[in-house]
Image (tube, helix red, strand yellow):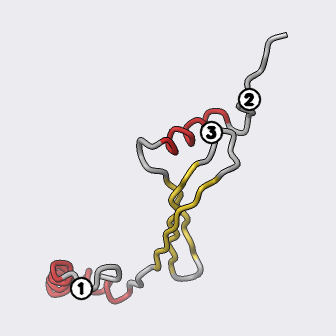
C-alpha cells in the first residue's frame, strides 16, 4: 500500500483482510512502511573490469538500513562478479614463464 496507494485490487485485499482477520488488523495497525531507495553504480577499478550493480537500500524504523547489491542475471556484469568471487583480488595480468 505504501508503494502502490492507488492499486484498487490491493486496497480491496487489505480491506477484506482487515474485516476478516483480527490478527491481520492488529499487525496492520502496528506496521510502518519502510522507505526504499534504489540506484545503479558502476565499479570501475576491479581486476575483472567494470561491473555495473544495482543498489537497493531498505530503511526500517530505528535507523536500520539493509543494503542489497545485485547484477542483472546472465549479464557480462554477472560473469565479472562471478570471476571476482573465484579470484578475489589476485592480479589478472598474464605472466610469462622464465
Q: Nearer the viewer, mark 2 or mark 1?
A: 2
| Whether residue 42 is situated above or below residue 31 in the rendered picture | above
Per the image, label 2 sits on a secondary structure element best described as loop
> Is 66 or 8 nearer to us in this picture?
8
11 sits left or right of 82 in the view: left
Count of labels in the image: 3
Q: Residue at x 59, y 56 (%)?
A: 42
Per the image, label 1 sits on a secondary structure element best described as loop
**Residue, disc 1:** 6
Residue 83: % across, % down: 59, 35
**Residue, disc 3:** 84
**Residue, disc 2:** 93
Per the image, label 3 sits on a secondary structure element best described as helix
Q: Nearer the viewer, mark 3 or mark 2?
A: 2
Q: Residue at x 80, y 12 (%)?
A: 97
N-terminal label among 3 and 2: 3
Quarter of the image that includes the C terminus:
top right
Q: Quadrant of residue 26?
A: bottom left
* Other-residue count near label 2 (Cα within 10 Å), few / some / many at <14 / 14–19 / ≥20: few
Amino acid at each position: 500500500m505504501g508503494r502502490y496507494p492507488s492499486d484498487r485490487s490491493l486496497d480491496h485485499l487489505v480491506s477484506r483482510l482487515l474485516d476478516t482477520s483480527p490478527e491481520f488488523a492488529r499487525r496492520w495497525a502496528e506496521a510502518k512502511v519502510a522507505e526504499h531507495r534504489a540506484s545503479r553504480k558502476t565499479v570501475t577499478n576491479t581486476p575483472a573490469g567494470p561491473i555495473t550493480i544495482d543498489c537497493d537500500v531498505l530503511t526500517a524504523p530505528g535507523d536500520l538500513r539493509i543494503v542489497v547489491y545485485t547484477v542483472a542475471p546472465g549479464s557480462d556484469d554477472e560473469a565479472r562478479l562471478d570471476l571476482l568471487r573465484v579470484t578475489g583480488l589476485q592480479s589478472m595480468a598474464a605472466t610469462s614463464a622464465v
